Structures are given as C-alpha cells and as structure tokens.
C-alpha cells in the first residue's frame, strides 16, 4: 500500500512539473519567475484533490482523456510556435513540444474529471438546480381534485410569468442601446440589403433574400404608419429585438418546465440581459441575429419534443418555423439542416407520425423558395468563389510559401488570377482579398473547369500537407481556439449613405457614449468575464456539454446539440474570416442551453405542462 501511495505521489509530482512547464510557456513567463512555483503548488494540490475525489465516483476516464487530448490539440495548434520560437534544433523543439503536450493533457484531464464529478452527480444537481414541489399536491384524487387542478394552474401561470419576465428584462436592458443607436446599426451589409428593399439594386441571395424580404416588410409597414424612413427602419429593429428576446423567453420557459430554481433562471436571464453584445446585436440589422434566435428556438423545441414529449401545437409550430428560418436565413444553415436531417429522422423515429411531416414540410419550403421562387423573382445567387474560401486560401498559401509548382499547375492558376501581387494581397485569416483578386480575373474559367481545379487542390494538398494544415488553422482558429480575442459589437450608427437614413440617436451625451464604450471594452479587460466574449470558449463549452451527456448515460440528449454541431461544422469548412463573432453568434446565444441541457434531470414525471391538468384531475 505504501509503495502504491509513493508511486501516485511521484506521478502527481511529475504531472505538476509538466503542467507548470506548459503554463509557463503559455503565459510567456521566464523559468525563474516565482509564479512558476505557484503554478506547481496549485497543480500538485489540485491533482491530489482530484485523485481523492475520483476514488469516490465513477467517471469515464477514457472519454475525459480523449477530450483532454482534443482540447490540447486545439490549444497548441495555434499557440505552439511561441513555445519553440527561440530554438533551432529539431530535437530540442520536439522535446519541448512533447513536454508541454503532456503538461496540458494532464491539466485538462484532471480539470475535466473535476468538472464531470459535479455535472454528472445527478443527485447533487437535482438538489441545487430544482425547485421541489410536494408531489402529493399534484396526485390527489376524489374530493381534492379541484385543489389539485388549481395548484397546477398556479404553477402554469408562474411558468408563463417567468418567460414574460425574461422577455421584459431583456427588452428593458436593451432599450438604451436602441435609443442610442436609433434607428439601428446599419453596416455596409445592411445598406446593401436596404438598397434591395428600396429597389435600387436587384435582389441578391448573397445576403439571404428571405431576410431582405422580412426587412422590407417591416420597413414598408413602418413607413405606411409614419411616413418617415428613419422610423420605418426602426420598425424592423423593434421586431428583431422582440424576436431575440422571444427566443430567450422560450428557453427560460423550457427550463421552467423542468422546475429549475428561480435563482438559476435569474442568472441565465442576466446573461442575456446584461452582457452588452446581446444588446448591441439586438439592434444591428444583420441576418445573423434572427438566425441565432432561430437556432435557439430550434434547439429548445427539439428538447421539448424529443425528451419532454410536449407534442402540442405551440412547440410543433416553433419547431417548424425555426427550422425554415435556419434553412433560409443563412446559406450555411441550409447545408447544416441537410446534414442534420438523417439524424433528426433517427432521433424522432418514435414520434414519426407527428414530426416527420414537419421535417418534410420544412425541407420542401426551403427547396421551393431557394430554387423556383428565387428564379421566378430573378434573385442573383452568390458567385462560386464565395463557397470555396478555404480551398482557395490553401492553394494561395502554397503559392505564397514559394513551393514548387509544375508549369501546367502555374498555367492553370494564371488562367484565373494575376499572380503579380498575390504575396501582398494574401491574408491568412481573411479570404476577401483573394476572392476579389479572382473576381478581377477570370472567375468564369474557374467555374468552367471545376474538376481541374479540384485536382489541383488535391495534388497540392498531398505534396504540401503542412501548408494546407497551417492555412486551415489560420483561417478557422477564431472559432475553436479559446484565446482569440475579437472586439465584439464595436459597430455603431449607420454607414455612410445617401439613401435618406442616418444615425439619429434619441439619447446621447458624454455619459451615454462613455458608458457604452466601457461596457464593450470590459470584455477585453476583465478575466473570467472575458471568456464570455470568446468564440473558442463557446466551442469548448459545447464539447464539454456533449461529453457530460455521454458520461451521464443520457445519449438521448445528443439530438439537442445536433443543430449547433452541424452549423459549426459548416462554418469550419467555408468561413471566409478567421474571427467573425457574428458567424457563430448562434453558438454564443445557445451557451446556457448547452450547459443546462447537459445537467437537466431525467424526465420522471411532468407536473407543470398545460396538458397535465386534465391528467391530474
């Protein structure tokens, strides 16, 4: 027993040493910094604590280790050049990277075990999360039927009031931004859609046509009521705020159906009401905002329909409408829905009679709108180069790294672009420069010879896999690397335009301006709070939540994460920008959903659904 204890002690000392080395490199410390000793002690006592705690619990070590390795790869894929930048020997570089890899795996592994020990402790979570009712109050029969029904009605009223409170709290906290940014934040993308609404340029699906039509509907409604263009634009802004707040209220209502404690609901509502980027986005005229609201609604409706079994008109309608919005409000949403469809069919196989017609209806709506309807209205589609940003960047990286190309390969590329300025234009994290170079060249030749360019991309990738991998990492790292800070929600006002709409703030002054500036900048200044501003952290939370569900033995919940996973995958295969927060705003908006769904109790009995009043009585 003593020898085993000694071995464990030595193992923890070694783990702590490697972890200290990894943290030292990650934080850019010198080896002599006294904080390295602090890191060592914290790691050592943490590992000892986790070891004692895990001796009492049954947690999947294999899944924790696999997740730890994945997180380490995601972290080091971007950060590793800083660890070896002063070393020239390949041997020393390899040793340092192996040591740091082991250190990070040890850290993430023990941290995940520690977190899983709480998120997978169902009894502990039920005590901390749930509001407990006296079951007898809901199961009385005979002379107490009326009392039972009355109590059920009170519970239902409380649930509705909770959702309404969440809606009003968000709207109230967002109103100052609405007044300051009146009639709404309009970037060049918004102006382009506004020009389509006014009929100044042809309809284009580069920015989703259905969203443009929705914008146009509320603009015309507002103009008919006010006769003022600025007020007309604000009508759409108000609608968007209501849609976003409504999706949050539906989420809070879903949690309330699980009897989640009011304090927890207050914290979740606070995340949406007080984190300033939600307020800024609520008044920003982008398709990404209603798209994110649709994603949250869709996820919540899946939870309602698949797990709780709330098969009623309300949730079926939300499921269908939000599914159509996902398909039509962003191009990648359509592909994500197609990717998710087989899994949705499998997940809802026991409720096929109710759900399959809705899935088919959603699919048909999207197909009809995207093809015959858009053709009938002569809606221009995005050009081909828009959909191949990452392959284009990878080929460009090979060229800019001065790799050897055959004469045929060079000639094929020069049929499309002029290579004279490609080194100056190439930006590893921003594809628009090269896209514009292609558009200025001969994109028609690219479209006509897709097979030849696919073969070129494939052969170059086989010859220079390192260049391709590096180019891919630099093009996508913002969505999965947790330390990629991106200034979020800094846009304001209306971009320069002569269309008759301008920034017309209803409130102002130094106090308002400075307050807004501080609220936005705090995300880049305050630790812990700043993680809420990281797309990479949101991705890690999604992965952590999925692992929690698997370890808890509740794989039936995985269907609730399906929309977010497929949407994230479509971003990772086609993003033109490495760090564009709005592209994955759906993931940030759904952040509390991921965590709460993982920790929700199993459905033992339903006590607060409207349908239960009849069952009880």
Image (cartoon, rainbow, N blue to C red):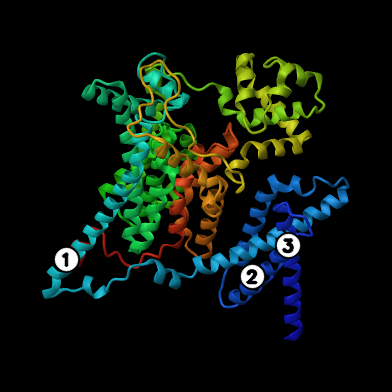
Q: Is mark 3 on a helix, strand or loop?
A: helix
Foreground of the two, 352 or 343? 343
Q: Distance between the residues labelled 3 and 1?
A: 63 Å
Q: Which of marks 1 and 2 is in front?
A: 2
Q: Residue 371 at x, y = what percent? A: 42, 24
Contact flag, marks 3 and 1 (Cβ < 8 Å): no
Residue 230 at least partly seen? yes
Q: Residue 486 in the image: x percent, y percent?
A: 56, 40
Label 3 Cα crowd, 10 Å radius (few <14 / some 14-19 / many 20+): some
- Quadrant for the C terminus, please: bottom left
Determine contact: label 3, label 2, CB under 8 Å: no
Mark toward the start of the polypeptide (1 vs 2): 2
Position of 508 with respect to 588 (left or right) is left
Residue 135 found in image quarter = bottom left
Q: Residue 36 carries which label?
A: 3
The answer to which of 39 and 192 lies nearer the viewer is: 39
Q: Is residue 269 above or below residue 376?
A: below
What residue does disc 2 label? 46
Q: Which residue corresponds to the image point at 49% horizontal and 37% vertical from the top-left?
A: 582
| Dot label at residue 149 | 1
Whether residue 350 is visible: no
Residue sitting at the far bottom = 1
Q: How far apart are marks 1 and 2 (CA)?
A: 51 Å
Q: Which of marks 3 and 2 is in front?
A: 3
Residue 544's place in the image compared with 517, above or below, is below
Are there few (<14), some (14-19), or many (20+) residues within 10 Å of tag 2? some
CA distance for labels 3 and 2: 15 Å
Q: Position of residue 168 (x, y in %)?
A: 29, 47
**Rendered location of residue 175, percent (x, y):** 33, 40
């Amino acid at each position: 027993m003593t020898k085993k204890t000694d071995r464990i002690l030595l193992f923890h000392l070694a783990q702590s040493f490697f972890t200290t080395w990894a943290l030292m490199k990650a934080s850019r410390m010198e080896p002599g910094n006294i904080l390295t000793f602090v890191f060592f002690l914290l790691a050592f006592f943490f590992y000892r604590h986790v070891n004692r705690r895990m001796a009492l619990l049954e947690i999947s070590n294999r899944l924790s280790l696999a997740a730890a390795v994945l997180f380490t790869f995601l972290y080091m894929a971007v950060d590793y050049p800083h660890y070896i930048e002063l070393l020239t020997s390949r041997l020393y570089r390899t040793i340092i990277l192996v040591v740091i890899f082991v250190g990070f795996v040890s850290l993430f592994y023990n941290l995940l075990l520690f977190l899983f020990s709480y998120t997978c402790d169902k009894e502990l979570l039920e005590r901390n999360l749930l509001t407990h009712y006296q079951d007898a109050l809901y199961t009385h029969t005979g002379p107490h039927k009326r009392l039972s029904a009355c109590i059920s009605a009170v519970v239902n009223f409380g649930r509705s009031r909770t959702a309404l409170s969440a809606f009003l709290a968000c709207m109230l906290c967002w109103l100052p931004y609405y007044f300051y940014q009146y009639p709404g934040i309009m970037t060049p993308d918004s102006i382009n859609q506004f020009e389509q609404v006014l009929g100044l340029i042809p309809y284009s699906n580069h920015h989703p046509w259905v969203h443009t039509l929705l914008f146009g509907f509320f603009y015309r409604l507002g103009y008919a009521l006010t006769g003022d263009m600025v007020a007309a634009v604000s009508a759409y802004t108000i609608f968007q705020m209501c849609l976003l707040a409504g999706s949050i209220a539906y989420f809070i209502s879903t949690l309330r159906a699980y009897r989640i404690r009011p304090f927890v609901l207050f914290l979740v509502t606070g995340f949406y009401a007080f984190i300033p980027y939600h307020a800024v986005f609520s008044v920003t005229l982008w398709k990404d905002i209603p798209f994110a609201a649709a994603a949250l609604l869709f996820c919540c409706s899946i939870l309602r329909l698949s797990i709780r079994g709330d098969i009623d008109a309300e949730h079926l309608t939300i499921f269908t409408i939000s599914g159509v919005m996902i398909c039509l409000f962003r191009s990648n949403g359509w592909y994500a829905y197609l990717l998710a469809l087989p899994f949705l069919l499998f997940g809802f196989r026991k409720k096929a009679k109710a759900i399959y017609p809705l899935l088919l209806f959603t699919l048909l709506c999207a197909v009809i709108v995207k093809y015959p309807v858009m053709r009938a209205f002569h809606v221009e589609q995005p050009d081909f180069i828009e959909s191949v940003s990452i392959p284009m960047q990878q080929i460009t990286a090979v060229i800019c790294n001065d790799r050897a190309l055959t004469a045929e390969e060079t000639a094929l590329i020069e049929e499309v672009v002029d290579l004279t300025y490609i080194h100056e234009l190439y930006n590893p994290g921003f594809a628009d420069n090269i896209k514009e170079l292609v558009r200025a060249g001969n994109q028609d030749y690219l479209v006509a010879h897709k097979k030849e360019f696919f073969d070129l991309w494939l052969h170059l990738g086989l010859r220079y896999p390192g260049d391709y991998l590096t180019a891919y990492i630099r093009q996508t790292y913002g969505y999965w690397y947790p330390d990629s800070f991106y200034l979020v929600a800094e846009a304001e006002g209306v971009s320069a335009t002569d269309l008759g709409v301008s920034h017309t703030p209803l409130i102002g002054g130094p106090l308002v301006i400075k307050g807004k500036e501080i609220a936005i900048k705090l995300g880049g200044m305050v630790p812990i709070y700043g993680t809420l501003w990281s797309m990479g952290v949101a991705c890690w939370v999604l992965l952590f939540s999925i692992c929690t569900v698997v370890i808890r033995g509740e794989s039936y919940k995985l269907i609730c994460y399906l929309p977010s996973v497929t949407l994230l995958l479509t971003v990772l295969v086609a993003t033109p920008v490495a760090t564009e927060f709005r592209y994955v705003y759906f993931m940030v908006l759904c952040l509390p959903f991921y965590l709460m769904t993982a920790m929700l109790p199993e459905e033992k009995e339903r006590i607060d659904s409207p349908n239960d009043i009849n069952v009880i009585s």
